[in-house]
Image (cartoon, coloured by chain):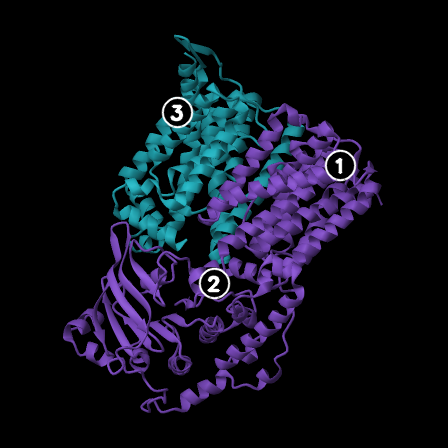
Chain colours: A cyan, B purple
Amino acid sequence: MQVLQLTVNGIINGSSYALLAVGFGLILQVTGRFHIAYTITYALAGYTASRLTTDYGASFWVALIVGMLVATVVGVLIEAYIYWPLGPRAGNFALLAIFTAALGLLTVGQGALGLILINSGTAQISGFNIAPEQIGQVFFINLDVYTVIISWALIVIVALVLGRTRLGRMVRAVRSNLTMSVAVGASPRMIYLVIFGIGSALGGVGGVLTSTKAAVASDSGQGAILYALTIAFLAGTFASVIRIAFVGLGLGILESLANLWVSPVWDPVIIYGLLLVYAALKPFDVVSKFRRPTLRSASASASEMAS
Amino acid sequence: MTLLTFSWIDTILVYIMFAVSLNLLIGYTGVFAVAPAAFGAIGGYSAAYLFVNHGTDLVIGMLVGIVISAMVAFLMGVPAFRLPTVWVILLTLGIQQVITGIFASINQFGAGYGLQVGKITFFGATINTSTTLFPVLLIFAVIITLLCWRLGESPYGRVLRGIRDNEQAVRALGRPVFRYKVAVLVSTSVMASVAGSMMTVLNGVAQPTLFSFSASVAMISMVIIGGRGSLAGTLLAAILITLLTPFLEHVVSLRSSIASLWQEIIYGALLVVIIYLRPRGIIPEGLIPRRRIPLGAYAAAESVTARLESAAARPRTTAIPRPERVDLDVVPEREVVLRADNLYKSFGGVHAVNGLSFELQKGAITALVGPNGAGKTTVFNLLTGAIPVDSGTVWLDGEDVTGLKPDVLARRGLVRSFQDVKLFGDLSVYENVMLGVQHHPGENGVGLFFRPGQSRSFERQARERALEWLSFVGMASEANRTAGALGYGQQKLVAVARVLASEARVLLLDEPASGIDHSWVDVTLDLISEIRSTGRTICVVEHNLHVVGQLADHVYFMELGRVTAEGGLAELTSDPRLAEAYFGID
């Protein structure tokens, strides 16, 4: 029974990780930005939602949507006014320059949120009646059900948009070959903005859902976002949205089941330990030895070789 | 006056230890590791745990911290440096979370409250005030700064700066880049561990917040804002950023908790502004110029300008006088220096090299020609071990060298140049060429610190050799200029001098005449001919058939990853099928 309970816990946590990992992974895959300031969009969405529900009496659902929109706008502005202009200036060092800028933004954002929280007191989302649920001997809360449903609904929508629409084809074109994508009518700048919008929106939703359970803090989401980064890398930098999501789900379940043997205190050690093992094996390309060669893997190999 | 209390001076000294050591990693080597505070935590908690539980002296705690930090850094660096840059960032982020997470969660380490150390002994003497701690911190800060200065501003540091600018080129010149990176990561982590021990003593407690990710970001900010690779800049930034908090507390009169948040906001914003407006920092590397070398007699050596004038004055119809060609048909038993047997390389479903075999004969110039996409540059990558072969064998002097890394092959005498030059743009011209000189004792820690006389003496010889080769290519007068400031044609010549300085017996030259005008092409042709006359074996990948015709003793024609014809250029170009394959015409 304990295994079942832990598995359900893992599915709930894993769904959140999957949502954030898809958001971060999309940004990383398409734009190549190591957007660690993603944490800020996450925390800001939670904070906005908390203010809306406590100060203005907005409903949870309105706060969820507004929080998501705020995250989207902030993400898009960061890309438009900081990352995009920085890329050409930094040339070959664009990755590190943009990561440095992201670190700066993260620090500014966390400091500013810390100041706000010192002045305004605790920020927590109200307006959602958290109630316990039980199926057999498995316990959870109603918010968990919403978290799982909303996360997977958004993941499926993003997967469909990227897989079945013209926008999705443009995104894949930009991701595969930026220069050639222009020749087929894509606008990399617009695609980057769209991707930052989508990725930040997903992070915003994650931020609001989490802040409904626990108060917003200046470093809210730092741990979850670092998990998301880990998942995005474990899934592979050319992975599909669904694959990233399932790696996130799997990691959530693994993390939870590990609590059969070790205290939750060791969760980060397990997750990052897994990452270290994966990283140690990656140069030997163990996984791809079991895959059939495809044109996409050829393109991936060539990119990795180039990097 | 309250701004500069001993307590704040002590804090500055601790941050200087963190920042100057991190500068070695981020600034000099270009490795963006983001966990200095985590290694500080190892040192800090080791000292605190041993003192609290066993009453041991700070020195013992520091030593234990050093050993653990070195092991953790090694275990992290070995996989991380085999992967692209983003993985290094990710893995160090992970290490930061794991290490601080462990200390924050385990009761034996005081969990969230940390371990109180109070009075601690250092070599038997009690340290309990910021005044008594000051001389200890000053000594450590000076030692760490001098160590970093010695490492950074030495032949060792030249290799590190080369790695930062272009690690592929450094590897191709025979330096084990991977080992350098791991060594610098371990050294930096050890110094951070020492700084962490001091941080614990200074604060009287080992606490997770002292070594959080935010603390790491503050240390990174000191390096970036100060100027990557700039020791003076890092020192200045460490002082300014640390003093922000007391300034905000005592001058702006903010509460301590609010002042530290404003400090974060200010240096975070500075980080963004600096990377945007002044990416090389407030005191950029090179603002305080490194030593210029005296050119002596080389200042009067024939410059490339004279060569260019001579090439321009030469009528285009006049054949360039060259050393005698090697007629391979007349001397068929000539020694084979390098042989490739049945090489295969695929990228996914694309067969870039598909059963290629060829050989290079001693003292001859061999050319690889073929249409775009034939796999010529991939062949160079395979021969030099830059990418692994799927199957097949490479023989160098009769020895199987398949699978050896580029640096190993370079040390065995097989060196390549690159189509896109890959000079180290931030280094001077002579430093670029000195990186070609092999077996410098000052390029490893043992030689640098324990055989300084030998290192200095070799440095003088290496400088002389660099000037000789620069003189050979007509670039001696530019020796002190920054390589990035040269024109493309000049850069190509410096790249040739750099390859020559390696004294390699086999040179693989990738499109030496591409992207330069006719006069420069003639200068390059002259040079390569002269190099052949020194007895070296040369292989050229070149699109310019005029160059191939002038130089090559033997030509291999490649199509779709394999050799489809060989012989003299005239013979090959007279074959209508090959002409069509190359030029796309009947």
Q: What element carries label 2?
A: loop
Dot in front, 3 or 2: 2
Residue extending furthest toward the top: A136
Q: Which mark is residue A150?
A: 3
The subunit letter for the residue under badge 1 reads B
Q: Tell me if B369 is positioned left or right of B482 in this view.
A: left
A73 above or below A62? Answer: below
- How far apart are the two marked residues, 3 and 1, measured between alpha carbons? 56 Å
Pointer 2 chain: B
Real-space Cα separation, disc 3 to disc 2, in angstroms? 55 Å
Mark 3 falls within which chain? A
Is A158 placed above or below B15 here?
A: above
Callouts 3 and 2 in the same chain:
no
Label for residue B174?
A: 2
Q: Name the residue under label 1.
A: B57
User: Which residue corresponds to the image point at 46% horizontal and 46% vertical from the top-left?
Assistant: A33
Which amino acid type corresponds to the residue marked 2 in the rendered image?
A: Gly
Residue sitting at 64 percent across and 23 percent down? B107
Q: Residues within 10 Å of mark 1 (few under 14, many from 20)?
A: some
Q: What residue type is labelled 1?
A: Asp
